[in-house]
Amino acid sequence: MIIAELLPVEKVLRDPIHNYIYIQHRVILDLINTREFQRLRRIKQLGTTSLTFHGAEHTRFTHSVGVYEIARQICDLFARKYPRQTVGPTGWDDHERLVTLCAALLHDVGHGAYSHTFEHIFHTDHEAMTRAIITSPETEVNRVLRRVSPDFPAQVASVIAKKYPNPQVVQIISSQIDADRMDYLLRDSYYTGANYGTFDLTRILRVMRPDKNGVSFQIHGMHAVEDYIVSRFQMYQQVYFHPVSRSMEVILDHLLMRAQRLFEIGQLTDELTVSFLAPFFEHHATLDDYLQLDDGVLNTCFARWRTHPDKILSDLATRFLDRHPFKSVQVTPATKKLVPKLQRLVADAGFDADYYTATNDSYDLPYDAYDPHAKKPRTQIELIQKDGSHIELSRISNLVAAITGKVQGDERFFFPKEMLAQTAQTEIFAPVYAEFNRYIHNDQIINQGGPSQWRLN
Ligand code: ZN
């Protein structure tokens, strides 16, 4: 059994979303104070999204303590309303509290700077890093967890990997309606200033209850759950898939790709870059190399690269730091075949198409009813009816049924803004620009040369 040492006096952190974050266990406070967790203060939660929504400067640190607080509130409610001693085996066993809280706090501890892009270029994996930080004996996080019991780090890691035997614990941290998603939707909505992400957290928590297969919701709270699903749908559409953030991600991706290339041919030699990034360029980075990186370190490298003699590297670094996004248009299955043609035109205008064009897709399922044959089956949201039987959400909510299983998102083609200049500065290239423009109309690639007023010559 786990001995959960309590602090003599409860500590609180102020938080704009939850008002207070309550810390009662010594282990939680000690985990927050580790080197690996403090590093999350230096990593923005939304990466390049802050270049579209300037308020989105919040960090992985604030989100992580927020997820902890929601998980803590769930444990409190479960322990008070549905204790196993009273309810029986479908109730909540409060001995699971500490492992739940630690997993909630640490679920993102392996995230790195600009995670998405960085992982793409250097083949790192934030989930593997999270596991490594929790289970490697040399980390401060591991040392704190081991004080609880020798196998406690492995237990916390197994909750995050969704392998922990108690499904209630796993689903509090990760399911279609979990502490992680509820915190990031509210927090990202607050910091971006986009109001779509709000929903009634207090109400959802009140109607949650533990059961044999995990967590379900009482039917009278259906509208609060619906509202959460719609909020999530809106946030993906309006914030997470925003074309400008994706465009800045493309620039970042190509900037790191160029740096890697120059390093390989011996042309990226400055001490700062080499000391931090060589292990990644050479694909032998250790956990310690990884923990040294944060947004500040990468941004400092980019500031250095701005004056590098390589024109592509310096230009992409400048575009990233000064926020000059690429333009983009939607690609459909019907127009996809035109992309190589457009890439050729970009190359004809003097840009290296490998670094100055890209296609990128962002797709998500707002909600998915359970399909055991799906590649990664998701837990469905179950409502408890008056007679105690369960019904899956989309079977009684028309609103949710309308977006269930529907993939949202799009595929876009990115290119330098200069290609759309109606009066090309360089006369000699004017026909190239004119031809390029004929393929672009209303944020789409079009099949024909376009209406005549769109022709520039
Ligand atoms: Zn998270």
Image: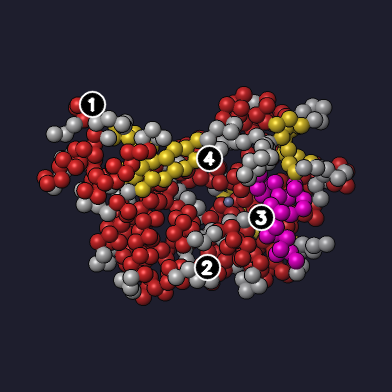
Q: Is mark 4 within 8 Å of ligand 1?
A: no
Q: Which residue is mark 3?
A: 160
Q: Which residue is mark 2?
A: 291
Residue 457 in the image, given as x and y percentages of width and height: 13, 34
Residue 24, image quadrant: bottom right
Is residue 314 visible in this depiction of the protein?
A: yes
Is residue 196 visible in this depiction of the protein?
A: no
Picture residue at 19% right of the left edge, 27% below the top:
453
Local SS, label 1: loop
Residue 273 in the image, given as x and y percentages of width and height: 38, 70
Picture residue at 56% right of the left edge, 38% below the top:
365
Q: Which residues are magenta?
A: 151-175
Q: Amino acid at mark 1?
A: Pro
Front residue (pair 275, 149): 275
The colouring scheme, among rainbow, by chain, secondary structure or one colour, is: secondary structure
Mark nearest the camera among 3 and 4 is 4
Local SS, label 3: helix
Report the side of 443 relative to 120 (left or right).
left
Q: How many marks?
A: 4
Give the spatial CA distance, label 3 vs label 1. 54 Å
Picture residue at 19% right of the left edge, 26% below the top:
452
Measured along the vertical axis of the image, is residue 453 above or below residue 189?
above
Q: Which residue is mark 1?
A: 451
Q: What crowding class fits label 1: few (fewer than 14 Cα within 10 Å), some (14-19), or many (20 or more)?
A: few
Pointer 4 with pointer 2, Cβ within 8 A: no
